[in-house]
Amino acid sequence: MSNQKTTTADPAAYQKELAELAEKSREQTQALYREIQRQQSLLAAASGMTRHTEAQIAAEQAKLNQLEEVSRHALRDLAAAKDKSDRAMQLYNAKLEDVKALRAKLDAEHAELADQQQQAKDVMTRWQQQRFFHQKQQAVLARLAAEDTSDLPDLAELTPQEQQPNSSAANSGKAHANADFWEKKQHTALKLRPAEQPPTDDTPAEDAAAMPAPAPKPSLAKTIFSYVACIAVAVGLAFAIRTWVLMPTEVSGTSMQPTLEPHDKLLTSPLPYLWGEPQRGDIIVFQAPSEPEGVYYVKRVVGLPGEHVLIEDGAVYIEGEKLAEPYLNGLATEGYVNTVVPAESLFVLGDNRTVSHDSRDSDVACIAFDEIRGQAVWRLFPLSSFGGIE
């Protein structure tokens, strides 16, 4: 009340105070206007970021849809490859049984052929001997017809000795010294098959020598070679399917629990990575570092090439964002890691983080693409867990 009286009583002081108040109000108004402009700029920037984020979400959704489509195709191809592998293995087993049966049949036919050859040889020997003595007897009869009775041979010399059938030439012996001569002379020209009949005594020796030899049968070596070639093709096909299509894998240890249990039987395939790269969450099989060739690890892909991976306070962060890992069932990730995944490499972890030997350890580190043998895509055993792997 006293101030108001003083201001009214002193116009100059009132005017000065009013001018100061007006200047202060102007400054505050300008400050508020600048703040409004700043807020409008921030609002515009936030709106732009929102639009950019929405565009990124749309792009990522499109990629996700594309990956989902690729995954569906991969699963279809995998099912087709599995069916083809099963058919190939069935064909291989059937061919193997056929080869075994043919081999047994071939052995039996070979034994029968050897027996028939021996019988034919015995028959030929007896026929040659009989013919020789017949010719000798005819000569003696001709001498008798000409009344030449001088120095006639004894009848024992004109009678062939009986031989037992199926006996070999070495064991039966020869009834006469000239029998060997006749056998050696006519052996190559007179080879009899079971269906053929030996020439009669009236057949000239020249005609007997001119008889055509039977057509040769396929050799045993060629037959065996064809069977071996068949088996080699089947084995090669099975090996190619096992190497480049489906590879059986058995889980050893507890580093992937609870997703995979010890002694689980898996099917691993490199096909998903022939047309694409590994994705986060994939369970891969790779050559174990610092281990002999053929020793593999099974781990889950966590970090992709070029990503910043941070492990601290029991959680995994990718590019500063905490990674959601429902397969851990609340299990903490032990250790501290702060790294960037190199190009053409992956950061992998086991699901059982307390015991897993993985990229957190320096002797494993990040896994190069060329060390990957494939993706674990199917569980075969136990039957209660038969199906795809997530």
Image (cartoon, rainbow, N blue to C red):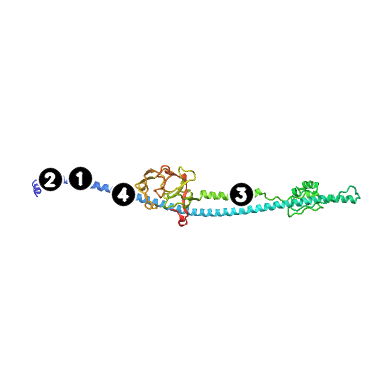
> In the figure, residue 344 lies in which quadrant?
top left
- Cα distance between the residues tagged 4 and 1: 28 Å
At 60% from the left and 54% from the top, the residue drawn is: 97
- Cα distance between the residues tagged 4 and 2: 46 Å
For label 1, the residue is 27
Element under label 2? helix
- Cα distance between the residues tagged 1 and 3: 101 Å
Where does residue 352 sit, x and y in percent of width and height?
40, 50
Out of 387 and 259, give the one closest to the viewer: 259
For label 3, the residue is 228
Element under label 3? helix
For label 4, the residue is 46
Residue type (three-letter) at the residue carrying disc 2: Gln
Q: Mark 3 against mark 4, which lies toward the viewer?
A: 3
- Cα distance between the residues tagged 3 and 4: 75 Å
Residue density around tag 3, few if under 14, some if 14–19, many if 20 or more, within 10 Å:
few
Residue type (three-letter) at the residue carrying disc 4: Ala
Residue density around tag 2, few if under 14, some if 14–19, many if 20 or more, within 10 Å:
few
- Cα distance between the residues tagged 3 and 2: 120 Å
Circles 4, 1 touching at the beta carbon (< 8 Å): no
Sequence-wise, the earlier of marks 1 and 2 is 2
Where does residue 22 sit, x and y in percent of width and height?
17, 46
Decide if residue 192 is in sight here. no
Residue type (three-letter) at the residue carrying disc 3: Val
Q: Mark 4 against mark 2, which lies toward the viewer?
A: 4
Circles 3, 2 touching at the beta carbon (< 8 Å): no
Out of 11 and 107, give the one closest to the viewer: 107
Q: Is residue 185 left or right of residue 68?
A: right
